[in-house]
Amino acid sequence: MAYSSRSEGMSSMNYKGYTARLEFSESDGVFWGKVLGLPPSTSISFEGETVAQLTQDFHNAIDFYISDCAKNGKEALKPASGKLMLRVAPEVHSAALIAAQASGKSLNQWAANVLRSAAHV
């Protein structure tokens, strides 16, 4: 399990390729989380009174989701396929293409590097 605290105040956990955003509910006295990057029709959430309980419930939720999909003959959705289509203004497209060519990269390679850097991966 990886836990990270980001400067924006968001904390996250990672397990088996799934990332969850973490919150704390003062009124309920529990930590809770929600898996990010899945379609709205697929919601995975979990909670715990301690970080250890939160981590265990996160792992259990992901393991249950994967096994339930397998049991029902469905493919477990991953947060992202690796394919991304963007619509941008023509002047942005042109500037990005020029920047990519100037750096000796394809637009796809250049954009992947820019996105990786912006996402802090």
Image: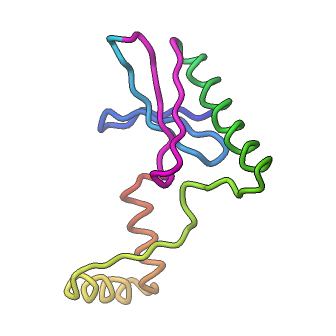
**Quarter location, residue 67:** top right
**Residue 120 sits inside the magenta stretch:** no
Query: What is the quadrant of the N terminus in the image?
Result: top right
**Quarter location, residue 18:** top right
Way the structure is coloured: rainbow
Residue 13 point in image, percent of width and height:
53, 35
Q: Nearer the viewer, residue 117 or 51?
A: 51
Look at 77% across and 56% down and name the residue there: 73
Q: Tell me: residue 83, above or below residue 96.
A: above
The stretch in magenta equals 28-49
The count of marks equals: 0
Q: Is 27 situated left or right of 66 in this image?
A: left
Look at 59% across and 17% down and name the residue there: 53
Residue 41 point in image, percent of width and height:
50, 51
Residue 8 point in image, percent of width and height:
29, 38
Residue 10 point in image, percent of width and height:
36, 35
Question: In this view, which residue lies farthest toward the front?
Answer: 72
Look at 70% across and 36% down and name the residue there: 64
**Quarter location, residue 55:** top right
Q: Nearer the viewer, residue 87 or 119?
A: 87
Q: Nearer the viewer, residue 52 or 46?
A: 46
Q: Is 56 situated left or right of 93 in this image?
A: right
**Residue 33 sits inside the magenta stretch:** yes
